[in-house]
Amino acid sequence: MTSPVQDAALQRLQAVRPQWRAVRFARNAVGLPEFTLLHAGPPYEDPCRPPPPVLSSAVLCCLYEGWAASEQDAEHLIATGRVKLVSAQSYGVVTPLAAVISGSTALVEAGDPTGAAWSLLGSGAGPQLRFGSRDPAILDRMKWRDSILAPALDTALRGEPVDLLALARHGLDNGDDLHARTTAASAALYDVLSARLTDSSIHTMLQQTPLFFLTLWMAACRLMTSAAAQNADPASTLVVSLAGNGIDVGIQLAGRPSLWHTAAAAAPAGPAINPALKVATAPLTGDSGVIDVAGFGAQALALAPEPAGAFAAWLPPEWQREQAQLYAGSHPCFTDLHCGLDAARVALHRIAPLAAIAMIGADGRAGLLGRGLFAVPQSLFASAVQSLETRCS
């Protein structure tokens, strides 16, 4: 049974009907100032010293914006604080893995009458800013994304927003977990958009990018959890954020959504793309845990045979039964899943919630290492609940 406090927050989450409404640049979408970069997870204790994968992405963004002429110049700007690294979620943005966002970055908007949330616009398969490497090919991809892809998609969406819940439901019905795998949802999205697009390079990219739906679903889940936190009772222990910055893992609760509760982050574990590559995996990095908090990703693996099979060796015994105990209810559009991670339930059952978050190289050079699973320390939830109870008493 859920409490009236949790019921109210869960009902607000369930009432959200996110649509992909627009593509806009960060400086306009969220008022991002010049010389500011948004990163995943809780704020850094020392934003002048981000971990190597985030530093690599920040360096590329400094070059892309024209703030620096070389990698060394960019590193100096970051180390001296002239370029500021700020938590993306303080701007209503969620960003995947080690991706950072500058003013010229194209963002996708998920919105409904309750508000809007933002995430990075994907740009196709291959080298990606979110993988935290310094591959120079990423700069050309960013230019194409922002000069060609972004305006074409924004035009395609004008007056015809895309229903994200319907695409998510299609994905789940066809083997997606909506985090480690979004193949079916991405294909369904292409079917919706194809008649609205004329550029052959965009058609090719969408057809060849099975994870394109991922950042759209991140924004949708952020919109849902943000609604849960709106005017929430201070005693609400519904989790509205789960993210890592490459150093710390953090959660936020609906009862006090501006406060991060943090602990040292471990690395996700899972099947490697190249087992022969001996590179350490970075500690948890990325905002995409919001997907699992809402009830998808690792919580939907029972509906997704392919990623579930890939993760089989890393899934604990009885994971389906145990994980279900940690969620407050179900969503009317997804009655075959559990919805709304509850920190109080985690503390009560002493079970670590699972999130499906990819592995990237800790060196800031290797990039993507493979899919990953992350078990969030249950002690983090216990301390968060205790902090909330102390504040409310």
Image (tube, rainbow, N blue to C red):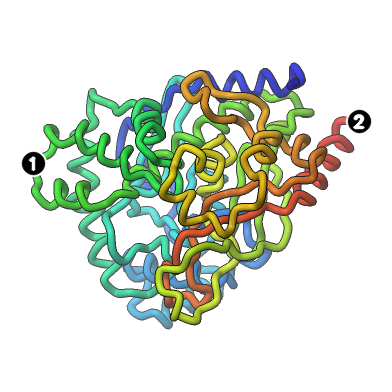
Which of labels 1 and 2 is toward the front? Answer: 1
* Quarter-of-image position of residue 184: top left
Q: Nearer the viewer, residue 331 or 98?
A: 331
Task: Please rate how many residues cluster around mark 2, counting C-alpha atoms within 10 Å: few if below 14, some from 14 to 19, many from 20.
Answer: few
Looking at the rendered structure, the secondary structure element under dot 2 is loop
Dot label at residue 393: 2
Q: Which mark is residue 83?
A: none
Front residue (pair 99, 48): 99
Establish if 335 lies above or below 363: above
Q: Is residue 280 visible?
A: yes
Question: In the image, 88: left or right of 141?
Answer: right
* Residue 388 locus on image (x, y percent): 81, 37
Residue behind mark 1: 198
The secondary structure type at the circle numbered 1 is loop
Height in image: 351 above or below 70? above
Instruction: Give the left or right position of residue 219, taking residue 267 as reference.
Output: left
Give the residue at x 46% y 68%.
Answer: 272
Quarter of the image with the C terminus in it: top right
Q: Residue at x 49, y 25 (%)?
A: 334
Q: Position of residue 263 (x, y in %)?
A: 73, 58
Which residue lies at the image location 83% right of the left edge and 42% below the top edge?
387
Going by the numbered disc 1, the residue's amino acid type is Thr
Quarter of the image where one finds residue 256 = top right
Label 1 neighbour load within 10 Å: few <14, some 14-19, many 20+: few
Residue 195 lies left or right of residue 295; in this view the side is left
Give the mark nearer the N terminus: 1 vs 2. Answer: 1
Which residue ends up furthest to the right in the rendered image? 393
Distance from the alpha carbon under mark 1 to that under mark 2? 60 Å
- Residue 117 percent coordinates (x, y): 46, 36
- Name which residue type carries label 2: Ser
Please give the count of numbered marks on the rendered protein.
2
